[in-house]
Image: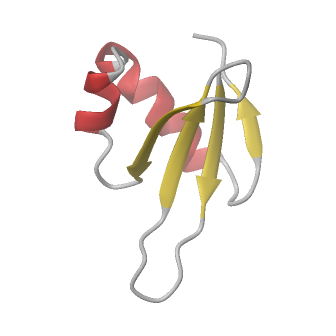
């Protein structure tokens, strides 16, 4: 699974994309509101781990997550 952190501009907030190994979009959510999206794709139990990775990831970078 891949994690991408996208920088928002002006009124558009920062977002996170979660993609599978074929780079298909699994979830797209605001950095400050991950709960519903992660729950919807069955990763609510991994939310803390994912959000810690988001916090440390620079904008525009891609990180491969091992879940």
Residue 57: x percent and y percent?
Answer: 66, 48
Quadrant in the picture for residue 11: bottom left
Q: Residue at x 47, y 25 (%)?
A: 49
Residue 51: x percent and y percent?
Answer: 45, 37
Instruction: Looking at this view, name the residue that lies furthest to the bottom.
Output: 10
Tell whether 47 sits left or right of 6. Answer: left
Q: Is residue 44 above or below residue 53?
A: above
Quadrant showing the N terminus: top right
Q: Residue at x 63, y 29 (%)?
A: 24
Tell whether 33 sits left or right of 67. Answer: left
Tell whether 14 sits left or right of 24. Answer: left
Q: Is residue 20 above or below residue 11?
A: above
Quadrant showing the C terminus: top right
Residue 52: x percent and y percent?
Answer: 50, 36
Q: Is residue 19 above or below residue 60?
A: above
The colouring scheme, among rainbow, by chain, secondary structure or one colour, is secondary structure
Quadrant in the picture for residue 46: top left
Residue 54: x percent and y percent?
Answer: 55, 44
Q: How many marks?
A: 0
Quadrant in the picture for residue 30: bottom left
Q: Residue at x 75, y 42 (%)?
A: 62
Tell whether 35 sits left or right of 5. Answer: left
Instruction: Looking at this view, name the residue that lies furthest to the top.
Output: 67
Q: Residue at x 37, y 27 (%)?
A: 47
């Amino acid at each position: 699974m891949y994690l991408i952190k996208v920088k928002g501009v002006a009124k558009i907030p920062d977002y996170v994309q979660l993609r599978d190994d074929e780079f298909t979009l699994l979830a797209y959510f605001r950095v400050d509101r991950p709960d519903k999206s992660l729950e919807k794709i069955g990763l609510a139990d991994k939310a803390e781990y994912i959000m810690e990775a988001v916090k440390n990831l620079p904008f525009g970078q891609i990180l491969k997550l091992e879940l």
